Image (tube, helix red, strand yellow):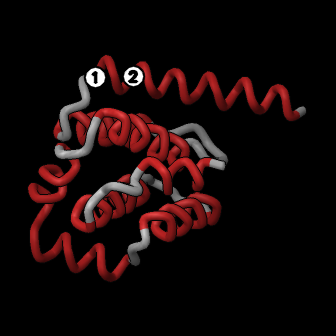
Amino acid sequence: MILNLMSANYSDANRNQRLSIANFLMLVYHCGKTNNDLQKEILNNYLLCLKVNKQESASYLQAHNVDRMFMDLRSLDMQQKTFLIILSHTMLNTERKPFEEELQFVSTAFKKIGVSEEDYEYNVFMTSFSERFLNSKLK
């Protein structure tokens, strides 16, 4: 379900934006102290939805640097940025509670793309609430 929403949400994103979204998600993945197979699978599925691969994304990042990635991400609309919060949080929150350093890294990164700390925290709260609600209904 989230992958269908992701495809729809970023359908009008240009190639550079999709590459930067992929790089951002890869940075989120790699900011963790420990990563698990499910997180890796989620990341790979995200990349498939964006229609980019790791090598292409890494080459774009290397050629244009992190500042360009943040510039590309700042050009997303607020709905796309909000969905990026959901994707990041979903990946970090897989099979374990995120570490404080991971949350700090992601929060700081979102500030760089124009998402206030309040908006970030609200969306993380709503994502967590939704996950808990859905999990309770599935049991």
Q: Residue 12: x percent and y percent?
A: 34, 55
Q: Give the amino acid at mark 1.
A: Glu
Describe residue 73's horizontal placement relative to residue 99 as left or right.
Answer: left
Name which quarter of the figure residue 85 lies in.
top left
Q: Residue at x 55, y 29 (%)?
A: 127
Describe residue 125's horizontal placement relative to residue 64 as left or right.
Answer: right
Instruction: Decide: is 85 above or below 70.
Output: above
Instruction: Decide: is 125 above or below 10.
Output: above
Please tell me how crowded label 1 is: few (under 14), some (14-19), or many (20+) other residues with Cα within 10 Å: few
Task: Measure the C-alpha gap from mark 2 to mark 1.
Answer: 6 Å
Q: Residue at x 24, y 42 (%)?
A: 109
Do tag 2 and tag 1 residues touch (Cβ < 8 Å)?
yes
Q: How many marks?
A: 2
Describe residue 93's horizontal placement relative to residue 82 as left or right.
Answer: right
* Secondary structure beneath label 2: helix
In the rendered image, which residue does mark 1 sit on? 117
Q: Residue at x 49, y 56 (%)?
A: 7
* Secondary structure beneath label 1: helix
The C terminus sits in image quarter: top right
In the rendered image, which residue does mark 2 sit on? 121
For residue 24, which numbered disc appears in the image?
A: none
Residue at the front extreme of this rendering? 12
Q: Give the amino acid at mark 2.
A: Glu
Instruction: Decide: is 119 above or below 78.
Output: above
Q: Residue 81: x percent and y percent?
A: 33, 39
Instruction: Decide: is 130 above or below 73.
Output: above
Residue at the right extreme of this rendering? 139
